Amino acid sequence: MDLLSMVLIGVGLAMDAFSISVSRGLALHESETNYALISALSFGTFQAAMPVLGWVSGLEIQRLVSALAPWAAFILLLIIGLKMIYESLIMEEEEFIFSYRELLVLSIATSIDAFAVGVSFALLDISIWLPVIVIGLITFILSLAGSYIGERVGHIFENRLEALGGLILILIGLKILLENVSFT
C-alpha cells in the first residue's frame, strides 16, 4: 500500500476523533490544555490499536463486528452527546470536568471502524505496521488540533457550545449508523 493511501485512510479514520476533539475542546479553558494532549494520545492510540486487533482477528470476527459496530458506536455517542446537551442546559458556567471513563468510551467509539480496516488489511495481505503508525499519528495530530480549535472557538461563545458539541456527537453516531446498517 502506498503512503498516500495510508494517509487518506488515516485522515478518514481520524475525522470522528477530530470532530469529537473540537466538540470537547469547546468546553476547555486554557488551564485545561493537558486534556487536549491526553485525549489526542488516547484517540491516536486507539485508532492505531484497533486495526492491529482487526488484522489479528481475521474474517470470522468481522461478520459479528460489522453487524454490531455501527450500533455500538451510535449508542455510545448518543449517550455522551445527550449527556453533554443535558449538562449544557442545567449547568451555567460550570467548569469542564475531565473524565478518563468518558475519554475511554469516546476513544473506543471512534475507533471501531479502524478495527474493520485492520480486518481488510489482513484479507488483502497488507502489512499492518506502517499503516498503523500513520493512522495513529494522523489521529493524534488532528485530535490535538481539534481540541485547540474547539477551545479557541469556545471562549468566543462561552459554555453554550457544549450543547452543539453534544449534537455533533449524536450526528456522528447517526452518520456511522446510517452508513453501515441496512434498514430494509
Image (cartoon, rainbow, N blue to C red):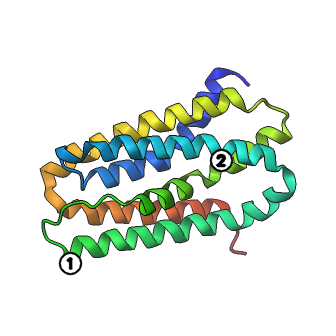
Residue 6 placement: quadrant? top right
Residue 90's mark?
1
Query: Residue 100, relative to residue 92: is it above or below?
Result: above
Query: Residue 136, relative to residue 183: is it above or below?
Result: above
Instruction: Give the image location of residue 87, x and y in percent.
Output: 27, 73
Query: Residue 16, relative to residue 161: is it above or below?
Result: above
Give me the residue at 39% from left, 44% from top: 38
Secondary structure under tag 2 reads: helix
- The quarter of the picture where the N terminus appears is top right
Give me the residue at 49% from left, 46% from top: 43
Residue type of the residue flagged with mark 1: Ile
* Residue 105 visible in image: yes
**Residue at mark 2:** 50
Residue type of the residue flagged with mark 2: Met
- The quarter of the picture where the C terminus appears is bottom right
Left or right, residue 60 beside residue 19: right
Residue 5 placement: quadrant? top right
Instruction: Give the image location of residue 105, x and y in percent.
Output: 50, 61
Give me the residue at 84% from left, 49% from top: 58
Give me the residue at 51% from left, 63% from top: 173
Q: Residues within 10 Å of mark 2 (few under 14, many from 20)?
A: many
Secondary structure under tag 1 reads: helix
Instruction: Give the image location of residue 180, x and y in percent.
Output: 66, 61
